[in-house]
Amino acid sequence: MARTIRFHRTGGPEVLRIEDVDIPEPKAGEVRIRTRALGLNRAESMYRSGAYVVEPRYPATIGYEASGQIESVGPGVTGLAVGDAVSVLPVLPLTEYALHGELVVASASKVVRHPSNLSWEDAAAAWMQYITAYGALIDIARIGPGDVVVIPAASSSVGLAAIQLARRAGATSIALTRGLAKVAPLRAAGASHVVVTDQEDLRERIMALTEDKGARVVFDPVGGDNFTRLAEATAPQGLLFIYGALAEGITPLPILPVLSKHLTIRGYDLFEIAGDPRRFAQAIESISAGLTDGSLKPIVARTFKFGDFVEAHRYLESNQQFGKVVVTT
């Protein structure tokens, strides 16, 4: 038996329960992991509240990301052994493998030894953010020197990962934030420029920073009314990724900028790259190298104890964090 996060109906953070659950031995191709830290993601908040692309099956477990030590190995598993320090890549279906518990089972094919220089917290915080940003910016957009990338919601974990990946690729990043409080931290995190959207004209500021050329890439998890202004500030033949829907209401389609500048608006999530074994392996190799050499460094906003899991979800939804929310076990 092990303490596991479960819920029996959708709703706010208060529906989450810590329950003792019998965790089976790993089957063929699986490993069982004694977790040390758990990474929290917006997708899990949406899943818990009934607003995700997957519907829960009750009693529902939850969780895409965890780090820990392998406790046992199922038949046929190679390359992993009892005692290995590992992370679980956040691509396993929540209805089959859920990782927010003290003892979890995962498919061995989605478990990696993490770089030895990472803490348990950093290891649990790394993979969702870097794979998401890498797939769009490096694998698809292939950003490099001379490119400008606009990053809304830049203080989120994925936004911060995008800033680091842009810097690593030699591109210029323009981080967007609503207020002044996060300007200095974003600059310290490596943003080339920061635009305060509550106080500055988004389009005019981006065009000024790019000498009226516009940004080649926009990496947007928000949508909403600002999406038209982002399109207006995108360079001809530019690429706008939309990988989330944080804004309430309808996101307009900016027809005139799209037509006049031949823009591409593209839906995206990390499962696109995860579904291609070759591209996914390249992403893991590149991210692992960055985590090892320090060019990629997860920023953890706050850690919570396992017993405070409900509070951790409340904090996740507060939009106060700068970086990743992590729970230790």
Image (cartoon, grey):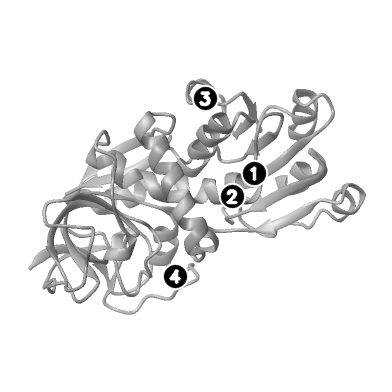
Crowdedness near tag 1: few (<14), some (14–19) or many (≥20) residues, C-alpha within 10 Å: few
- Would you say the residues marked 3 and 1 are in contact, meaning their CB atoms lie under 8 Å apart? no
Q: Identify whether 199 is placed above or below 290.
A: above
Q: Which amino acid does label 4 sit on?
A: Gly
The residue that disc 2 covers is 139
Q: Which mark is residue 50?
A: 4
Q: Which mark is residue 142?
A: 1
The residue sitting at the right extreme is 260
> Of label 2 and label 4, which has the lower sequence position?
4
Query: Is residue 318 in view from this perspective?
Result: no
Tell us which disc is closer to us: 3 or 2. Answer: 2
> Of label 4 and label 3, which has the lower sequence position?
4
Q: Where is residue 69 in the image (x, y as percent from the top left)?
A: 16, 52
Residue 287 figure quarter: top left
The residue that disc 3 covers is 190
Q: Position of residue 202 (x, y in %)?
A: 73, 33
